[in-house]
């Protein structure tokens, strides 16, 4: 594959309209995620003006899965809902042409029963798969390298397998790490630099990014716009982390500053200055 | 109905004793709520000196439902407990004359199976129903206007239906919005102005208010005191939001400042100044 | 029993290496806890450099229970997993010689069915039991004195029963209160002074301490080092609370400052100064 590799940060012209579209459209985003990450995910979505609903109350997976503008499924949500709930939501979303994001949290940590459920979900056609290096490698059929919810593999190891996954399944694969790699179904490769290591010290920060990716999918009318938009969300996430890190005294004040920064980024005329 | 409409803010003499009573009595408040909102709800109750316990561990619904000073049932708690758990808790509360609050989260969002459970709960006699405009309209038998957990209806549309609900079921109905409307079983109508739009950007802020309403119910010996006390809780909530908004850089620092402000309001001699 | 009673604060030489070991080893810690406390627990563990995973997804209790460096079981986790999940995790941990912490949240609150599950867990040999006065008394066979998740008993009442429990079951018993008491299997008695009452106004603060105790257990090669290490974790927790309280405007800003302070304590050369 002869892919073009692009670098894209928050100053890229593709970034500016992304959060503005979310704020103006305020899309209804449905999420099946875990209770450790759910509150931050909801707050990240509310901060940018989206309208999230989370969880598998009776009738919600089939109802909200089809009604939402987009959906995200965080595999660790299996700590508080069933595989059946997830499959019901995914089927409803697919039937209604609602795009959805799959986050294969903790895949490849050596728990076969759990990984099998994620494989079943992945086979139903998510628009985007987002995870860390170990998770993407496991989903692509590689060895188990995760330790609980943390990766032990490097981005460099994961990118070739992620590219193969993206091309063979015709979806976008986003790998989070010291820099993020967004891989397209036709071999596209966008590198998103920046961010901050404190993001890895806040539980659910990766999970919330899955929700935010769903939010941007909901605002697009053309599938061809997805790749740049997904990269833009990663770039804005990285930028908010950099802003938050400037004034943080530790991971908790960082988390507060991060959500605040995301809420202000959408209003910024010039993202590069204060935002 | 020829109702008297009153406006009541945090300077109203009915507000001052409300938080003081909670702090002095430290009532045990039992809650069945959802994992997205649970942490904030517990922290709001702890901030004002109440003693919350949340969730449906084996034996808790029947045990804590009857032991608590008051209880709140948040319908979105169905993402992490069963309808049977909720009904068991409600029956235990009713048997022990424990007042309880029902929050019909996401009612009227087009999921019939879910709405039916809420209707069953509502038929068991909550002391207070608290929700947004769409939820109250749906519970009163109106059309489905919710989008997930968000309202698309206006307060003006909801008030007449809320009044009918309050009078026919002999309970208090509290509708949250740009201004809050507290409706009594005999046609009373209290409008609570103030608050801040950032409250709508913090997940679970409405849910936590349901817990706080339960806390104040637990401190009252006479049912006739409930209406003003419920309005007072809304007025103090609005006041804490205004205080928090002054120094907020976004919704996350607002949420921190909001809980802090609630904890300080209870100690204030003069709520109007710094509080 | 003729126990030696020691007082140990954060300046004790046993404190310094504790957090450094966690940071360097970054142990994988598995937790079964409740959704009210889960996010704070994960963030506390991430703040000190541990790698937590929480919850009972399919296959996790048996898989992660045996893979982890240590585990903690918070009884109120029964609001979101089954007793079977907890027993499976405990059996897997025991089979793999993974030490685990039991937190008997809300034991002794008058719910027999719930207390029985905790007794079954306790009989499987936790390395450490950590709780408040009422919980420890209930687990030791005393009367029910809890009110929901809060204690109504005093430390003075709980210590003798905790000592008996520690000696008869050959485990460490840690009782949290205005000062903490760490009781060893051979009659050792360490008192940890300090801390701050605001810790009792943050939901899950005690629960997160259970996770932190598990993290330190994971870093020790010798069982004989456990008692001082458990006391050290309590002393550092108390110190972080004191630091956070200095700048707090209420319980929410306190919670933020507390996690931040924990993250900085691990890097401090001199814990006594700014830390």
Image (cartoon, coloured by chain):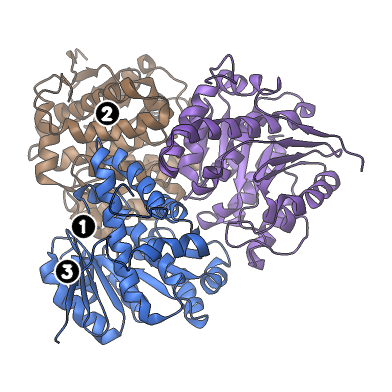
Chain colours: A blue, B purple, C brown
Residue A86 location, x and y as percent? 44, 70
Q: Which chain carries label 3?
A: A
The residue where tag 2 is placed is C173
The residue where tag 1 is placed is A150
Binning the other alpha carbons within 10 Å of mark 1 as few (below 14), some (14 to 19) or many (20 upward) gives: many
Which is more foreground, mark 3 or mark 2? 3
Residue B260 location, x and y as percent? 46, 29
Q: Are marks 3 and 2 on the same chain?
A: no
Q: Please tell me whether residue C101 is drawn above or below residue C79 in the rendered image.
A: above
Q: Do labels 1 and 2 share a chain?
A: no
The residue where tag 3 is placed is A144
Secondary structure of the residue carrying numbered label 1: loop
Which is more foreground, mark 1 or mark 2? 1
Q: Earlier in the sequence, mark 3 or mark 1?
A: 3
Along the horizontal axis of the image, is B162 left or right of C22? right
Which is more foreground, mark 3 or mark 1? 1
Q: Which residue is drawn at 68% across and 36% down?
A: B193
How far is disc 3 from disc 2 in space, using C-alphas? 37 Å
Binning the other alpha carbons within 10 Å of mark 3 as few (below 14), some (14 to 19) or many (20 upward) gives: many
Q: In which quarter of the image is the N terminus of chain A?
A: bottom left
Q: Which residue is drawn at 18% across and 58% down?
A: A147
Along the horizontal axis of the image, is B154 left or right of B267? right
Q: Please tell me whether residue A225 is drawn above or below residue C205 in the rendered image.
A: below
Binning the other alpha carbons within 10 Å of mark 2 as few (below 14), some (14 to 19) or many (20 upward) gives: many
Q: Which chain carries label 1?
A: A
**Occupied quadrant, residue B67:** top right
Residue C262 location, x and y as percent? 23, 33
Q: Residue at x 17, y 39 (%)?
A: C217
Q: Mark 2 lies on which chain?
A: C
Q: Please tell me whether residue B112 is drawn above or below residue A254 in the rendered image.
A: below
- In front of the other: A133 or B247: B247
Secondary structure of the residue carrying numbered label 2: strand
């Amino acid at each position: 594959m002869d892919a073009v590799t692009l670098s894209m940060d928050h100053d890229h012209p593709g970034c500016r309209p992304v959060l503005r579209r979310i704020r103006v459209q305020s899309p209804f985003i449905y999420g099946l995620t875990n209770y450790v990450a759910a509150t931050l995910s909801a707050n990240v979505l509310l901060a940018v003006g989206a309208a999230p609903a989370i969880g598998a109350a009776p009738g919600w997976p089939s109802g909200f899965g089809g009604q939402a503008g987009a959906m995200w499924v965080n595999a660790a949500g299996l700590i508080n809902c069933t595989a059946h709930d997830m499959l019901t939501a995914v089927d409803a979303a697919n039937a209604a042409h609602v795009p959805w994001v799959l986050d294969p949290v903790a895949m490849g940590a050596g728990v076969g029963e759990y990984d099998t459920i994620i494989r079943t979900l992945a086979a139903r056609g998510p628009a985007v798969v987002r995870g860390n290096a170990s998770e993407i490698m496991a989903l692509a059929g590689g060895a188990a390298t995760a330790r609980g919810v943390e990766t032990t593999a490097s981005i460099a190891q994961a990118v070739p397998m992620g590219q193969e996954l993206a091309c063979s399944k015709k979806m976008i694969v986003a790998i989070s790490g010291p820099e993020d790699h967004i891989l397209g179904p036709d071999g596209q490769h966008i590198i998103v630099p920046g961010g901050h290591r404190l993001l890895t010290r806040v539980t659910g920060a990766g999970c919330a990014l899955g929700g935010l990716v769903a939010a941007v999918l909901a605002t697009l009318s053309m599938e061809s716009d997805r790749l740049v938009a997904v990269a833009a969300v990663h770039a804005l996430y990285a930028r908010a982390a950099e802003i938050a890190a400037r004034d943080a005294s530790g991971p908790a004040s960082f988390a507060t500053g991060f959500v605040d920064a995301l809420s202000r980024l959408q209003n910024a005329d010039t993202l590069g200055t204060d935002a």
